[in-house]
Image: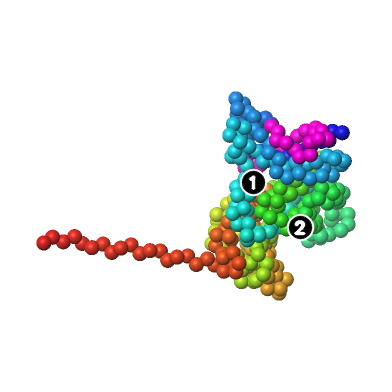
Amino acid sequence: MAYQAEYIWLDGTEPTNLLRSKTRILHDEISEPPIWGFDGSSTNQATGDKSDCVLKPVFHCHDPIRGGRNVLVMCEVMIASTGRPHATDTRAACARTEKKYADREMWFGLEQEYTMLRADGTPLGFPEGGGQPAPQGPYYCGVGTGRIMGREIIERHTQACIDAGLSISGTNPEVMPGQWEFQIGPLGPTAVGDQLHVARWLLHRIAEDYDVIISLDAKPVRGDWNGAGCHTNFSNVAMRENYEAIINACEAVGDNYMKLVENYGHDIQSRLTGLHETAPWDKFSYGVSDRGSSIRIPWQVEKDGKGYAEDRRPNANCDPYVVSRMITEVICESLEPKTGKKVKKAPAKKAPKKVAATTK
């Protein structure tokens, strides 16, 4: 009997890629989804005279919406003429970094915030036709009519992620009306990106049935409202064994803070203002239990003397492959593999003294 495979990929839309997908009918004897093609000229990934791009399956799981043998297939985009990753593909670089530092066993847990919008662009819970709801306060992890909106979508999405076999680890209402969060992980740098994108796709797809738009904008509503982030929890073997490695990892990120934050998603300056549980986008800090710092060390981690840290700066619209790759590179290049101590750099060689030429 034939079954359906939904091929999912990221397009070339700027400044933030959009998810695309299309369905392929496969037959019983095909157990692994094969490569496929698409029109890259319609996704900002090719020109009309050389329009073919290739979808290379990298991860697949059960399709919880269609059920049966049907599958969801996350793909990389490849250039048809060379077979190499497309310029818009960020997964390949992430996979190379993960392989290079495989002995460090980097783990990531991503907290995906998002906002549910009506067709007119206003969040669920905001008055239709304009105006403001009651101020922030009762919505975070709240319950009850007037405080919580869109719960039916959340319940369906959560169960869909579980049925798909994704590593979803929790959900909760967020600080602004119509804003929610789900968490994926802990997983390796590449796998966490694969699964977050499939979970995002499922969320968009389920929301279609309710005529609800899922927004990953960093600051969907201007003013005295929280933005939407993708807080990134990270650790390696050394961090999971000793607290000093966590401090050293935070300092390594701090040494590269602008390099990282510039790749953490579009419009990050509007969200990281120093208000609404954020640190300023152009400054770096870390602290225990401090949601106003760039990196938060959970109180339980300090108490246990080991664990992980949370980079609170990535936007809801960030590319998880880019975020996990860059954090992996920064930490693994700066710290020793087993102890997590700072890498001792060889002192720079002094240039030989110049000796003035003499004549006899």
Is residue 268 in view from this perspective? Answer: no
Tag nearer the camera, 1 or 2? 1
Residue at the spot of label 2: 175
Residue at image x 66%, y 53%? 189
The magenta stretch spans residue 339? no
Residue 240 image-quadrant placement: bottom right
Q: Residue at x 73, y 53 (%)?
A: 112
User: Which amino acid does the dot numbered 2 rest on?
Assistant: Val
Question: What kind of element bears circle 1?
Answer: helix
Q: Callout 1, which amino acid?
A: Arg
Lower sequence index among marks 1 and 2: 1
> Going by the picture, which residue comes out furthest to the front?
29
The answer to whether residue 33 is magenta is yes
Place of residue 84 in the rendered image (x, y in percent of width and height, measured from the top left): 59, 38
Q: Given contact means CB atoms under 8 Å apart, are the residues at marks 1 and 2 in contact?
A: no
Mark 2 Cα-neighbour bin, 10 Å: few <14, some 14–19, many ≥20: many
The residue drawn where x is 68% and y is 73% is 305
Judging depth in this view, the residue of 253 and 97 nearest the camera is: 97
Local crowd at mark 1 within 10 Å, few (<14), some, or many (≥20)? many
The residue segment tinted magenta is 13-37
> Which picture quadrant has residue 253?
bottom right
The dominant secondary structure in magenta is: loop
Toward which corner of the image does residue 66 lie, by quadrant? top right
**Residue nearest the observer in this picture, 352 or 48:** 352
Front residue of 105/66: it is 105
Secondary structure beneath disc 2? Answer: loop
Q: Is residue 332 visible?
A: yes
User: How many numbered marks does the figure carry?
Assistant: 2
User: Which residue is denoted by mark 1 in the rendering?
Assistant: 91
Q: Position of residue 147 (x, y in %)?
A: 84, 56
Question: How many angstroms separate mark 1 from mark 2 (CA)?
Answer: 31 Å
| Residue 37, placed above or below residue 319 | above
